[in-house]
Amino acid sequence: MWAGRSELANALSRHSTIPLLQRIMIRRSGAAMAATHAAAEALPSCKEARVLIARLPSEGSCEFAADTGSSMIHLRNPKTGAKACYMLTGDILQEVHWFKEQFSSWFLGDHVLEDGSLYVGTPVDPIFLLLPILDEARMKKADDAGKFRSLEEILYVEDYPGYQHFSCLLGDTLDSVCEVREIGTSKFYRLNESKVLSWLCCKVNNTMKGLSSLEGHGSMLEGEKEVQAVGLIGDYLKDSDWLDKLCTYLGVDLQASRKPQVIDESVPLFNPKPNAGKKEEKGLSGKSKTQKKGSVVGMRKVTQFFAMER
């Protein structure tokens, strides 16, 4: 369901840093759901704790080290620009989703957590979150490709200090979407449209391969998988910006695929119309109506069975 190997990472407190220590058994009340791994050594009050499923920081280990921490940071949603919560675990950036059933709770060791909500962290490519930032940073004009900016300038976003963590996440990945100029030991970046479209096409192709491996998607036509993949990638792109450019580049019409299918009126519907058959009944003769109603000769009325004897 989620990319990579996901484990139950922690009982998440409200603090920004999450200690990941001892193994516990967590079971969902009213359902057969159990998982292991890492919780706080001493849970705060049960009202403070949260349950989170997230990806491990390293593929080779199934246990977290005692000094491993995960930080919750706020970044802009790449599609809407609204503030959203993300989790940074080692060198993995994960977006945090929240699920809540109407009646649910958690058993955490000897504690009962009244809040049965569940947080799920799924890895996301940092470039998706940086595309709007890089686009703004180049200050492009109609007749000008824009300016080259240093990484420090790009990652400085007012009211969002969380972007400063990206300096240790990106490495050379910016080269895949940006033109790079080196002056001495310093590098300067400018977003390049053709590179971005090529990078997005690679993401679409990888998503199509992932869809092919899912149950029920293997029989889909390539065109259908491409439309669905573009739609999934589009959840991280602004409609009026890169999503429109990607659709134009690939020749995909998302709006046409979202139109509801028209039902052929020649095919009878499951529920017939309430007035259907009345016209046919009007054409019946008096004799036919009597036959349809059935003979009542020799039959007593129902009310006679309940009449009082005198």
Image (tube, helix red, strand yellow):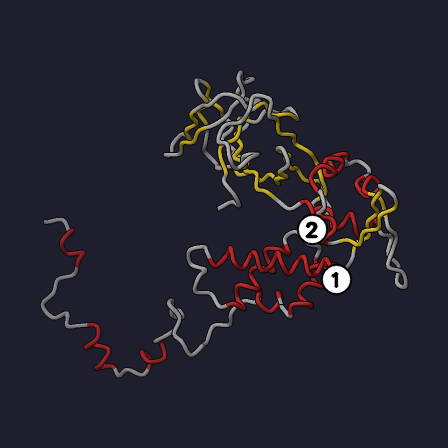
Residue extending furthest right?
143
Q: Decide: is 179 above or below 221.
A: above
Residue ID at (57%, 64%): 227
Residue 115 tag number: none
State the residue in front, 87 or 294: 87
* Badge 1: residue crowd in 10 Å (few <14, some 14–19, many ≥20): few
Residue extending furthest top?
42
Residue 219 coordinates in the image, percent (x, y): 43, 65
Q: Is residue 154 left or right of residue 69?
A: right
Q: Amino acid at mark 2?
A: Lys
Residue ID at (17%, 58%): 302
Count of marks overlaid on the render: 2
Q: Is residue 28 left or right of residue 79?
A: left
SS of the residue under disc 1: helix
Residue 194 tag number: 1
Residue 33 coordinates in the image, percent (x, y): 40, 34
Q: Is residue 300 left or right of residue 287?
A: left
Q: Decide: is 54 above or below 125.
A: above
Residue ID at (72%, 35%): 165
Indicate which disc, 1 or 2, sits on the residue closer to the N terminus.
2
State the residue in front, 304 or 15: 15
Kindly report the distance in space between the C-alpha atoms of the residues bearing marks 1 and 2.
Answer: 20 Å
Q: Are marks 1 and 2 in contact (CB under 8 Å)?
A: no
Residue 223 coordinates in the image, percent (x, y): 54, 68
Residue extending furthest front?
184
SS of the residue under disc 2: loop
Q: Amino acid at mark 1?
A: Ser
Q: Nearer the viewer, mark 1 or mark 2?
A: 1
Q: Which residue is mark 2?
A: 79
Q: Decide: is 105 above or below 216.
A: above
- Residue 293 falls in image quadrant: bottom left
Q: Is residue 118 left or right of residue 129?
A: left
